[in-house]
Image (cartoon, grey):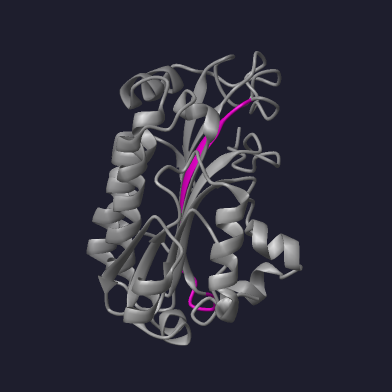
Amino acid sequence: MSTDLTLPRPVSPPHVVRLELDTFSGVDRPALASWFGALFTDLLAPLCPASIEELVSVARGYRPSDTTPWGPPGYARLLLSSGEFTPSSWAAALADLPSFLRVQLVQLDSQGLPLVEDGWSAEILLKDDPAFPHQVVVTASRSLFRGWISLATQQNWLSALRSGAALVRACGGWMTLDRAGVRTAHEVAVGVGLDESLFMAAELARGPHWATLLGPRQVAALGGVQEVCASAPCFAVEHLGGGRILLQLTEHVDEVPDDAVQKLAEFLGPVLH
């Protein structure tokens, strides 16, 4: 029986934590592999309802059927874009680092199928396509965090955003708690297509977010590093070097008033679609 890696859409409840980095730069592949592996270890694995070893062990003894094609009823399943998830297959994928790599954690219902309504999923995706900006996307449904997203967890995600931005020389990026799909809430609101937004990612930010990473061209268009650091209406503004600035809108990702988003949107006006 072949493995179907296509999930029903949407794959998670409306509220998801989403982190994305976009870049047009060539990347040090071994360094990217190490960082990408850390994303799984530090961001995804702690959200698992069971240890990786337990998930792999259960999956190894599972035999699919017509009624339970995905996995043990009521359990969860880890998948790689290249096939079944095992520690050895994950290590091999990182060592080879293919141009497209995805690892998913999916909750299954009582029939062993992906649970869409009131379910959860987490995913890390690397897309290294020469025809498009390279993308790293990390998503996790909010229900995985058991309610309040702790400051420690929030900082882990921000740290990954910072280190990844430097590693891939990102032209932009963001982290948010939203109803985000492949397009940002801003792109949906103004009717901008995904291809257009990706090709313009170096010049135009993809929206005001709780954490907004501005690339060098965007910072220059807003008046330069000193101007952005002095004027951005945010809880924290951090110059990451290389002309990149990370804007943190409020102290906590769970508390983002609409008026704060509006003020940031007005500030980012020159670099928004």
Residue at horizontal 48 percent and vertical 86 percent from the top: 221
Does any portion of residue 118 appear in the rendered image?
A: yes
Q: Quadrant of the C terminus?
A: bottom right
Residue at horizontal 49 percent and vertical 80 percent from the top: 202
Q: Quadrant of the N terminus?
A: top right
Of 147 and 83, nearer the camera is 147
Q: Position of residue 247 (x, y in %)?
A: 40, 62
Residue positioned most to the right = 191
Does any portion of residue 199 appear in the rendered image?
A: no
Give the left or right position of residue 34, taking residue 224 as reference. Answer: left
Residue at horizontal 29 percent and vertical 40 percent from the top: 42
Q: Is residue 103 above or below residue 239?
A: above
Determine which quarter of the picture holds residue 119. top right
Q: Position of residue 218 (x, y in %)?
A: 46, 80
Is 236 contained in the magenta span? no
Of 105 and 233, nearer the camera is 233
Of 269 and 80, nearer the camera is 269
Q: Is residue 237 above or below residue 39?
A: below
What segment carries the magenta color? Answer: 119-132
Give the left or right position of residue 159, taking residue 182 as reference. Answer: left
Q: Position of residue 29 (x, y in %)?
A: 28, 67
Is 124 contained in the magenta span? yes
- Disc tally is 0
Give the left or right position of residue 4, taking residue 169 as reference. Answer: right
Q: Position of residue 57 (x, y in %)?
A: 37, 19
